[in-house]
Image (cartoon, rainbow, N blue to C red):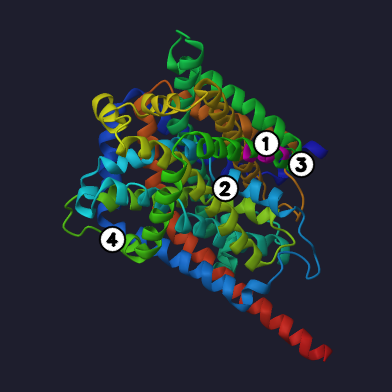
Amino acid sequence: MNKNRERGKIDWMITLLPLTIIIALCILFFFAPEQSNAVLSQIRFFFGDTFGTYYLVIGLGIFILSLYIAGSKYGDIVLGESNEKPQYSFFAWGSMMFTCGLAADILFYSFSEWVLYATDPHLAEMGSIQDWAGVYPLFHWSFIPWGFYLVLAVAFGFMLHVRKRTRQKYSEACRPILGKHTDGWAGRIIDLLAVFALLAGTATTFSVATPLMATIIGELFHVTVSRTVINIIILLITCAVYTYSLLHGFKGISKLANVCIYLFFGLLAYVLLFGGETRYIIETGFSSLGRMMQNFIDLSTFTDPLRTSNFPQNWTIYYWAYWMVWCVAAPFFIGNISRGRTVRQTILGGYIFGVGSTLTSFIVLGNYSMGIQVTGKADFIAQYLESGDLYGMIVSIIKTMPGAPIIMVVVLLTMIAFYATSFDSIALTASCYSYHALNDGEQPNKSIQLMWCILLILLPIALLFAESSMNNLQSVSIVAAFPIGAVIVMIAVSFMKDAKKYMESLEESAKEKA
C-alpha cells in the first residue's frame, strides 16, 4: 500500500524522459564523436555568436535586480514565519551554500585560469598580464554568477517557506505569471528543460577537475594504470561519500560542508603565509579587485562587435550560460537552507560568504603562481603552450610550494569534499523533481535519493570512455542555457509580482489590527 502510494507521488515523465535523452546523446557522442562534435560546435557557435547579448543582458540585469531586492522593502520578508529564526548558524549556512554552489573545479580554475587569459589575444589588447590576467577570473566567478544563484534562491525560498507550495520545481516558481498553465504543458516543458539542463551540466562537471585529481594521484603514488581507471575510482569514491552524506539528511551535508570549508581555507592560508609570495598575492589581489570594480559595467557589456578576438563569446558568454545551467540545482538548495532568514540576509550573506570565499580562492592560488611567473622564477605559460596540459602545469605549480606532497594530498581531499557536497545538493534537488508534490520540510524517499546518487555518477563514468564527449555534452549544456535564461527571467518577475502581493496583504492586515 505504502509502496503504491509512493509510486503515485513520483513524476515518472520528469524523471525518466530527460535521463533517456541524455543517455541517447551519450551513446551518439560515443559512437560518432567527430560528427556530433561538429554539429554541436556549430549550434554552440550560433547561440554564442548570434545571441551573445541575450546572455549578457540577463546576467547584468539579474545582478542589478538582486541589489534592488536586498535594498527594497522586499528585503524584509522572512523566508518562513514572521518570527522564525534561522535553522543554521551563519557559518554552517554559508559553508553549505558555498560548497553546493561551486564544485571542485574552483580549485582547478583558481590555479590555472590566469594562464588561459594570459595566452588569449584579447589580453594583449587590454594591457599587461600583470594588470589583467588576475582580473578576469574575479569577474567571471563573482557577482553576476552569485547574483543568478541568490535571486533564484530567495524566489524558491519564498515559494517554499512563505507560500508553502508543495511542488518543488522550476515551473511552480513561475505560477504567479503562468497561472493555471503551470499545471499544463507549459509547466511540463519548463520542468523538462530544467532537469535536462541539470543532467547535462552535472555530467560534465567532473570533466574539468577529475583529470587533475588523477594526475595528482599518479604523481603521488607513481601508479602505472591508465588515467581513465583512476578517474573511475575517484568517481566511485566521491559517489560513496556524497551518497552516505545525503542519506543522513541536512545534518550529514552540513558536516561534510564544514570539513570541506576547513580543508579549503586551510589550504589557502598555508599558500598565503608559507608560499613565499605573500606580499605579491595581497597587493596584486587588491589591485585586480579594484580594477574589476572600476571596469565592472564595461566588462559586463563587452560584446566584441568586430570579432577581433571573440573573447566574450569564448569566455563571458560561455560562463554566464554555464552558470544558468547550474542554477537549476544550487538555488533550490540555498532557498531550502535559508529558512528563517530574511530576503536581505540571504542575498547579502550570500554575497559576503559566496563571493568572498570565491574571490579569496582566485586571489591566493592564482596570484601565487602568477607571482612566480612574472618574477621569472618559473615559466608556467611556456609549459602550457608547449604541452597543452593544464593538469601537469598545476602539478608543477604545487611542486614549487614547501611540503608539496602534503599539499597535493590536501588538494585531493578538498576536491573530493567539494564534489561530494555539491552533488549532495544536486541529488537532493533532482530527487525533489521526481515528485509531483512535497510538503514544506518533507524529504524525498531514501530509495529515490539513492537512485539519483547512482544515476548522477553513471553518466560521467560512461563519458570517460569517450574523451571528446565531455566537450560535446558541455556544448549541450550551453545550448540548454538559452531557454533556461528565459525561465530565470520569468521566475524573477514572478517573485516580484508575488512578493508585492504578499507585502500588500501584510500592510492590509496591519491596518485592520490598528
Q: Which residue is mark 4?
A: 302
Q: Give the mark nearer the N terminus: 4 vs 2.
A: 4
* Mark 3: secondary structure: helix
Q: Which residue is mark 3?
A: 251
Q: Which residue is mark 1?
A: 259
Nearer the observer: mark 4 or 2; the answer is: 4
Residue 432: x and y, percent?
66, 46
| Residue lying at 46% horizontally and 16% vertically, measured from the top left | 219
Q: Are marks 3 and 2 in contact (CB under 8 Å)?
A: no
Q: Give the mark nearer the N terminus: 3 vs 4.
A: 3
* Mark 2: secondary structure: loop
Give the dominant element type of the magenta stretch: helix, strand or loop: helix
* Mark 1: secondary structure: helix
Residue 336: x and y, percent?
68, 54
* Three-letter code for the amino acid on which mark 4 is drawn: Phe
Q: Name the quarter where the C terminus is drawn.
A: bottom right
68 with respect to 289 (left or right): right
Q: Quadrant of residue 302?
A: bottom left
Q: Quadrant of residue 258?
A: top right
Disc number placed over residue 329 in the picture, else none: 2
* Three-letter code for the amino acid on which mark 1 is drawn: Val
Q: Quick one: 415 or 501, which is closer to the camera?
A: 415
* Three-letter code for the amino acid on which mark 2 is drawn: Ala
Magenta stretch, residue numbers: 255-261
Give the answer, above or below, for where 348 lies relative to 407.
Answer: below
CA neighbours of label 1 inside 10 A, class few (<14), some (14 to 19), many (20+) = some
Nearer the observer: mark 3 or 1; the answer is: 1
Q: Give the mark nearer the N terminus: 3 vs 2.
A: 3
